[in-house]
Amino acid sequence: MTIPNRNFSYPTALRFGSGRIKELAGLCKANGIMRPLFVTDPGLAGMPMVKAIVDDVRSAGLAIEIFSDVRPNPIEANIDEGVKAYKAGQHDGVIAFGGGSGLDIGKMIALMHGQTISVFDLEDVGDWWTRADASKISPIIAVPTTAGTGSEVGRAGVVTHPTTHEKKIIFHPAIMPRVAILDPELSAGLPAKLTAATGMDALAHCLEAYSAPFYHPLSAGVALEGMRLVKENLARAVKKGSDLDARGNMLMASTMGATAFQRGLGAIHAISHPFGGLYDAHHGLLNGIVMPYVVKANRRKIEKDIERAAAYLGVKGGFNGFLKWILALRKEIGIPHALKDIGIDTKRLDEVAAMAIKDPSAGGNPIQFTEKQYKALAKKCVVGDL
């Protein structure tokens, strides 16, 4: 193999550990943020935890306000309303707080409040990101409360298009948060079902980054260790939400997955994105259901890599053993076996396949599936034909 020329970047500053949220006000000041807009989802906005955090930041002399008009699968209108709130409050930075939706919309507000173009003009296609005026992008501090998306270390956000229902990946290097606070105490109250679903999202990121066919040894190593952390901690976090060691390790696995997937994602995401956009289903749950079908479909290209991963994870049986481990983990934490189990049918498979082959994640799959192959694979995911 001829080693290609590549550029690598792992720049995010992380503050990891219980109680680190107390450093939020100081981190805002250190990054020139005196009037932060605190962006989160409606469920979190009403929780005592958020009130305590906002009060703490306000007591440090910062003019903080909350914006929480954020859907689980964010849409353009959430960004538009957030931009209005940002301008009305004369804010100078964003605290993105919550799961993937709160983090992504926070990043999009920081990006879009100073732009004159549509957010969809900044889709992750070629060099479209250069269309933005980077000087107008505000600093961001990210605080995840779920261990799944890893958006706290990402340069992109996902937004559903209002007419096509496609999930669009919006990219700009300047929306990488300045700092991410990984405090396991903030995720301790997450319900078991959401812990399971978001944890499978983290596993999907690690697994697809590890399997992507591009030269990036840094990502491959980070992804492999991320999978180990998921294996040893996800079920513990689901069964006992107050287990801060398990919560902390899952937060790190989530961050590692998103750090690693600059190597690439794959067909798990290429299929999950259309189903999520068309059926408004939870992204992590979709990834968890779709995962074993895609792993099996990719077998001829990834078998040796998966055998090495299985050995590192202490999973016996090579590729088959690895697949059995995924199935056993899903069963243990309550992830359904088929998409039909969460109300998804086969009526829109043509749309799913057409959207999957165009999804940016598809380019990182070890096998470049045709539209016909995506349709057949999506059907297997719906009906449970493994």
Image (tube, grey):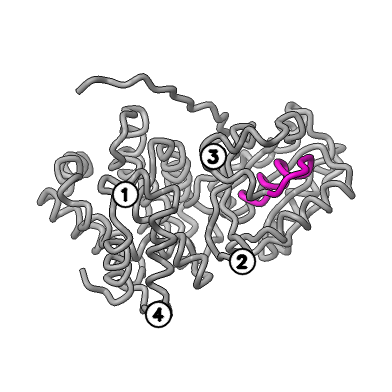
Tell me the chief SS of the magenta region: helix
Badge 1 vs badge 4, beta-carbon distance below 8 Å? no
Q: Marks 1 and 4: which is nearer the front?
A: 4
Q: Which residue does the numbered mark 2 point to in the structure image?
A: 163
On-image quarter of the N terminus: top left
Q: Distance between the residues labelled 1 and 4?
A: 38 Å
Residue 240 in view, yes or no: no
Q: Distance between the residues labelled 3 and 2?
A: 26 Å
Name the element at disc 4.
Answer: loop
The residue lying toward the viewer, choosing from 276 and 162, is 162
Mark 2 residue crowding within 10 angstroms, few (<14) / some (14–19) / many (20+) = few
Which amino acid type is shown beneath numbered disc 2?
Thr
Q: Which stretch is magenta? A: 103-118
Which amino acid type is shown beneath numbered disc 4?
Lys
Which amino acid type is shown beneath numbered disc 3?
Gly
Q: Does the magenta stretch include residue 71?
A: no
Q: In this view, does 376 lie above or below 200?
A: below
The tag earlier along the polypeptide, 1 or 3, is 3
The tag earlier along the polypeptide, 1 or 4, is 1
Which amino acid type is shown beneath numbered disc 1?
Glu
In percent of width and height, residue 142 lies at 63, 42
The tag earlier along the polypeptide, 2 or 4, is 2
| Left or right of 86 in this view: 168 | left
Q: Quadrant of residue 268?
A: bottom left
Q: Which residue does the numbered mark 4 point to in the structure image?
A: 347
Badge 3 vs badge 2, beta-carbon distance below 8 Å? no
Name the element at disc 1.
Answer: helix
**Residue plotted at (77% across, 34% down):** 136
The tag on residue 154 is 3
Mark 1 residue crowding within 10 angstroms, few (<14) / some (14–19) / many (20+) = some
